[in-house]
Image: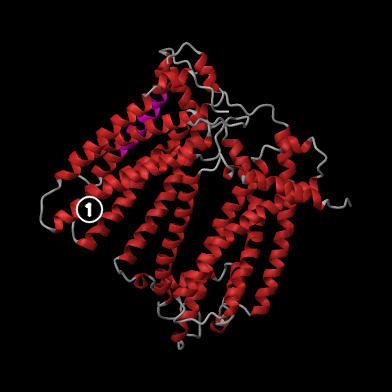
Amino acid sequence: MKKLNWQLVGALLKKQRIEDSYPYRRGKFDATGFVLKVLLLAAILAVFAVFFGRFVTIYTNVKGVFGVEGTESRPNLHPDLRTYELLTAVYGIAFLFMTVSAVSQINRRIFDEDGAKLYAAMPIDATSLYLAKAVAVYLGQFAVAVLVVFAINGTVAFAVSQSVALGWQYWISTVAACFALPLLTMAVGSLVAMPYRWLKQFLQNKFVLNFVLVTLLTGAAFWLYSLVLDAVKQMLLGDDLKYFFDEAKMTAIVKATSCFYPIKWAVDLLLVNIRPQSLGVGHSALVASLGIVAVVAACTALSLVMLRFILQRSLQMRNGETSAHKSLGDVACGKSAFFALVKKDFLLIFRTPSYMFSYLSVAVVMPLMVYFCMSVGSSLVYSLVERHADLEIALFLTLLFGALTNVFCATNVSRDGEMFYAVKAFPLSYKSVFFAKIFLCLAITAVSQLANAIVLCATGSVAWYSAIFLFVVGTLFGFVNICVATRYDFNHARFSSDEDGEIKESSGVTSAIILLGLLSAFVVGGVVFAVKILSDLRNLQLGWVTYVASGVVAAVCALLAYFYLTSKLDKKYYEFEGGM
């Protein structure tokens, strides 16, 4: 057996570390995007801690010891059992989440990296290469595990501190879970990675089917999100969710969580101090430890074998490729050069999965996103202040999600790649080139905003004239985002060096557009909402302020955005030599 070259493994890991840190180097670092990501992560963790902590308190106070025979006479033990059930269920959800993350990281590290041909031409043995890839995947999973495990365990420990004595063993097991859980998710993820890759290849050229599936999955994800929002609303309003957990539901939860192996063993070790096995559930620390060790060893071996197989398949697939360039086919419409350019941009979006998801699919489900949040926000505001502000809430959500829909416009120029120079060489005016992009984006935005207005009107969320107003204002602010994004991207164009020309990483342009969208939503939507609530509380009839203020601001911003787009655009276009 050939001796493993640890120096080579270290060099490969260093290469991956340098590549991962490339976006953070001077001149490439997107400070705005980094700050937004940190703030978003902090906000998610804070919101999770507050609301999950509240849920833990409610659930652990459910009376009775359901699903466990012979313990009805000891109902005082229910907090221990409730904590055991809750951690088992939540760890099951976390396991699924981390498995999806593992599949994503395996595909990114092994299939989507561009060094396969380079590795094949260099004296790099397969063992060192796949071990370096496996370590990189594990480190990525470990980082996810640290965030997930400590967020869950820390929140639970704080919430049950008054009723359950967890002990120091709880925190020892928490640290151990951060190291062991990635091995389990890597093993399952390695089994799913190849079928997932085959499914992607099957759908690669089936653009309509791909679009339908991605849109349905996105809509389903936001439907689940709406259920979570509804539960959060109930907790904010003080509704006691513990009455939702009747005997039948509790018994079903107990029976379901009793089958969550090997998750149950991990929870046994976390809660070894309270001895949940005394209630007839769980196992001793010895049994749980032996079970975890056996599963981790088996999963480690399985993941290493599967990752080696996946790497070999990846090298064969990448080395067998002839060209990754996408053919746009015949983009001539038989009408005019302008519509040929519109069709070219549409096909480029439609035939690139990441572009299609981040723009078309999000634009399709945007009305659902607004409606789901609207149904929760409206009832929540009325319950808190006993005043209606449906139009103002709808305006805020329309601007917020409309801005997220238009984020993709931040690559309006960059996604063309070197094709931009080919178009520039054609006998076409700069207005045709840029206005074709603006027209396509604005058409999609207008259709999305129209669907949003129809949904809000049909569901009775707003009146018909308010729906028309939301459509106009939403489309105007969409025009603002599109113009600013297109000109900003043109000024800071960066063409991808990949063979397919796809822009895979976010940039300062994307971050700037997200920030602009957030500001427009919170400033315009937030101000009119505050004016509406305060005026109603003082019995003042100032509802017209929402229409006048937001309408005027939208019109002015649209004019300013147009002038920003067209200012010296002709000179900039004919002198353009950037993007490389």
- On the image, the x and y values in percent for residue 490 come to 46, 28
Local crowd size for mark 1, using a 10 Å CA cut-off: few (<14), some (14–19), many (≥20): few
Say which of 285 and 35 sits in front.
Answer: 35
* Main SS category, magenta section: helix
Kindly identify which residue carries mark 1.
Answer: 530
Residue 83 visible in the displayed image: yes
Residue 31 vertical position relative to residue 43 in the rendered view, above or below: above
Residue 23, by quadrant, is top right
User: In the figure, is residue 524 to the left or right of 172?
Assistant: left
- On the image, the x and y values in percent for residue 182 come to 63, 59
* Magenta residues, start to end: 436-451
Q: How many marks?
A: 1
Amino acid under label 1?
Ala
- On the image, the x and y values in percent for residue 300 come to 72, 59
- Is the C terminus in the top left, top right, bottom left or bottom right quadrant? top right
Q: Is residue 442 magenta?
A: yes
Residue 128 vertical position relative to residue 333 in the rendered view, above or below: below
| Residue sitting at x 50%, y 78% | 81
Q: Is residue 430 magenta?
A: no
Say which of 218 and 13 sits in front.
Answer: 13
User: In the figure, is residue 183 to the left or right of 447?
Assistant: right
Residue 392 vertical position relative to residue 269 in the rendered view, above or below: above
| Residue sitting at x 46%, y 27% | 346
